[in-house]
Amino acid sequence: MIRIAPSILSADFARLAEEIRSVEEGGADWIHVDVMDGHFVPNLTFGPPVVAAIRPVTKLPLDVHLMIADPDRYIPAFAKAGADLISVHVEACVHLHRTIHFIKEQGVKAGVVLNPHTPVEMIRHVIADVDLVLLMTVNPGFGGQAFIPAVVPKIREVARMANEQNKEVDIEVDGGINAETAPLCVEAGANVLVAGSAIYNEPDRAAAIRALREACAK
Ligand code: DX5
Ligand code: ZN
């Protein structure tokens, strides 16, 4: 089953609650929250207070994507704010195994994220410990960028690696996902699709979500 996770990075922040409700009513499965620190990535977004503020607005799981240096410092605050899943970048974690278990100790699901250039091999020895692997299909930092097709074979590699270790893991893709690129990812083994501009740039959120699902069902 394919899950659609609209990224609120492309929402109208002045009307954030309404924007979240519009995708929940439109059939979204998760809400994707892009946290940027202006250091790991060249942009700034939200912190734990924003996660806490949106928590009562929706029943959907909050999928918190940390694009921050030294994420261990903030993991407890995001867990307390109501994150259901916290994903950290392999490139930002010196002691990745420790960080993954630190997330789980907070009672939250744990994900690992790979930038487009980072080899899948980096997660071989932690894939059994995580709930989700997120493959960036753009360089993180901004919404509305073009999908990088070279990432598609990495989706297959993650699926194969999980299978070899008899591990069920969600495979999420993030960046430039739309009705053209989503089917390529799903065909390769992705089951969670993050979409920012493809959903929030459309006035009819339900139609945008339906278009993504229908494109992948073909
Ligand atoms: C990029 C973020 C994405 C972004 C995706 O750094 O991680 O979640 O919002 O936006 P689109 O779907 O517009 O590429
Ligand atoms: Zn993201």
Image (cartoon, rainbow, N blue to C red):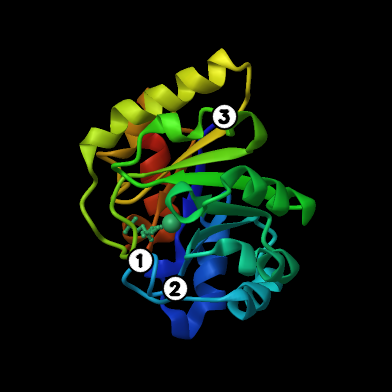
Disc 1: residue Cβ within 8 A of ligand 1's nearest atom: yes
In this rendering, position of residue 168 left or right of residue 189: right
* Residue 197 location (% of width, % of height): 32, 61
Residue position for label 2: 37
Q: Secondary structure at mark 3?
A: loop
Q: CA distance from mark 2 to mark 3?
A: 27 Å
Whether residue 217 can be seen here? no
Could you tell me if the residues under marks 1 and 2 are in contact, i.e. CB atoms within 8 Å? yes
* Residue 190 location (% of width, % of height): 44, 32
In this rendering, position of residue 134 left or right of residue 17: left
Q: Earlier in the sequence, mark 1 or mark 3?
A: 1
Q: Earlier in the sequence, mark 2 or mark 3?
A: 2
Looking at the rendered structure, the kind of residue marked 1 is Val
Q: CA distance from mark 1 to mark 3?
A: 26 Å
Looking at the rendered structure, the kind of residue marked 2 is Asp
At 26% from the left and 61% from the top, the residue drawn is 144
In this rendering, position of residue 204 left or right of residue 123: left
* Residue 135 location (% of width, % of height): 41, 41
* Residue 34 location (% of width, % of height): 47, 64
Q: Residue 84's image quarter?
A: bottom right
Label ID, residue 125: 3
Task: Say which quadrant the C terminus sits in.
Answer: top left
Q: Where is ligand 2, by quadrant?
A: bottom left
At 33% from the left and 64% from the top, the residue drawn is 141
Whether residue 130 can be seen here? yes
Looking at the rendered structure, the kind of residue marked 3 is His
